[in-house]
């Protein structure tokens, strides 16, 4: 019996490939609504971040989430991400 394959995703902040369940996902839905997806199952275009404040700062400074999701990201989404990351640390 083969071992189950673990899906890897790249962090937008540091560029490391990590298991999908260890990352926080930001989703842009088909309607253009942005949200933080903790389950990793919402439909839409997604971008992933490590649950570290440093990775969020790097991604925000270089506008990597905006490029990945092809839209402007409001400050409310960044604040929500900061809250989720501070809870996990």
Image (cartoon, rainbow, N blue to C red):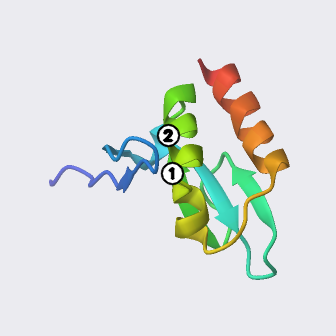
Task: Out of 2 and 76, give the one closest to the viewer.
Answer: 76
Q: Residue 34: x and y, percent?
A: 77, 63
Q: Are marks 2 and 1 in contact (CB under 8 Å)?
A: yes
Residue positioned 62% across, 23% down in the render: 88
Residue that lies at the very extreme toward the left in this rendered image? 1
Q: Identify the mark at residue 58; answer none if there is no mark.
A: 2
* Disc 1 crowd, CA 10 A, few/some/many (<14, 14-19, 20+): few
The reply, left or right, for residue 83 in relation to residue 68 is: right
Residue that mark 1 sits on = 62
Does residue 81 sit above or below 66 in this rendering?
above
Q: Is residue 86 found left or right of 48 in the rendered image?
A: right
Check the picture and name the quadrant holding the N terminus: bottom left
**x 47%, y 38%: residue:** 22
Question: Looking at the rendering, in which quadrant would you find the C terminus?
Answer: top right
Q: Residue furthest front?
A: 61
Q: Residue furthest bottom?
A: 30
Q: Is residue 32 above or below residue 21?
A: below
- Quick one: SS at disc 2? helix
Callout count: 2
Residue appearing at x 60%, y 69% in the figure: 69
> Quick one: label 2, few (<14), some, or many (20+) residues within 10 Å?
some
Estimate the x, y position of residue 11 in percent, counting from the top left: 42, 47
Report the residue at 69% width, 52% height from top.
37
- Where in the figure is residue 31, as x and y percent of width and height? 81, 81
Taking depth in this image into account, of 61 and 84 the one nearest to the observer is 61
Q: Which mark is residue 46?
A: none
Residue 78: x %, y % from top left? 73, 44
- Estimate the spatial distance between the alpha carbons at disc 2 and disc 1, rounded to whole Å: 6 Å
Asked which secondary structure carries label 1, the reply is loop
């Amino acid at each position: 019996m083969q071992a189950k394959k673990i899906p890897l995703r790249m962090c937008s902040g540091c560029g490391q490939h990590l298991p999908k369940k260890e990352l926080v996902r930001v989703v842009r839905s088909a309607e253009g609504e942005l949200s933080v997806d903790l389950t990793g199952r919402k439909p839409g275009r997604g971008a992933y971040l490590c649950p570290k404040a440093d990775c969020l700062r790097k991604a925000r400074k270089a506008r990597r989430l905006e490029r990945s999701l092809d839209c402007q990201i409001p400050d409310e989404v960044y604040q929500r991400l900061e809250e989720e990351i501070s809870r996990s640390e």
